[in-house]
Structures are given as structure tokens and as C-alpha cells.
Image: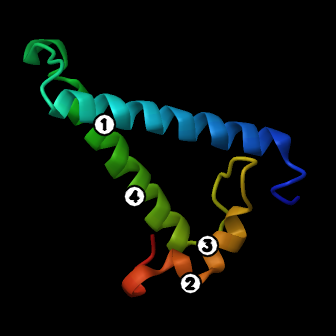
Amino acid sequence: MGAITDPVGNGLAIIALVGMLIVLGGSLYRLRGGYSLPITAVWWQMPVVALAGVGAAIYLVVMAVRPETAVCLPVADCRILQQSYHAYPFGMPV
């Protein structure tokens, strides 16, 4: 299924892109001192996001080592990406 003929995948990708741009804009606004939250309100979020990142990294390494196919969204074919040279930057599986 090509990118042009996959409206669901394209829609999900566009929604993710818009979300990332909103977060980037909010982060830049906050860095400039426009808004700050009390530290006590979000103290638990950083460890949760860090653990989610570690979990995703472990999952991707396991999928790179095992011959199984990774769970994939309809945006792309994960097997093709796992077999490409982009999956091994600097010789390490990603």
C-alpha cells in the first residue's frame, strides 16, 4: 500500500506531526519565560516519560535481534524498515 493510497496512515501521520509542532511551540514559548508551571504539579511526568522511552528502546532492540515482525501501525511496513540500513546506524540496531 503506497503512501498516496493510504488515507488512514496519512491522517495519523498528519495528526502526529501537528501534535509535535504544538508541543515544540509550547516548549519554545516556555523556554523564553512566557509561562511556567509549579514544579510540584508535574514532578512525576519526567520519570514516566523516561520509563516509556526505555521500554520502547528495549522493545526495538528485541525486535531487531529476533526474527519476528514488530507491531506496526498502518503508516509503514515495519519489516522493510527493519531490514534496511537505516535500522543499523553506526552498526547498532535501533
User: Element type at marker 3?
Assistant: helix
Choose the circle earlier in sequence order: 3 or 1.
1
| Of 60 and 30, the residue lying toward us | 30
Viewer-side label of 2, 4 = 2
Front residue of 35 and 55: 35
Q: Depth check: 87 or 6 in front?
A: 6
Q: Earlier in the sequence, mark 2 or mark 1?
A: 1
Report x, y in % for residue 19.
50, 32
Q: Is residue 55 above or below residue 80?
A: above
Q: Is 23 on the left-hand or right-hand side of 28?
A: right
Q: Secondary structure at mark 1?
A: helix
Q: Position of residue 10 (x, y in %)?
A: 75, 44
Earlier in the chain: of badge 1 and badge 4, it is 1
Q: Helix, strand, or loop for circle 4?
A: helix
* Quadrant of image for the N terminus: bottom right
Could you say which disc has been placed on residue 58 in the image? 4
Q: Which residue is mark 3?
A: 82
What's the CA distance linking mark 1 and mark 4? 14 Å
Q: Which residue is mark 2?
A: 85
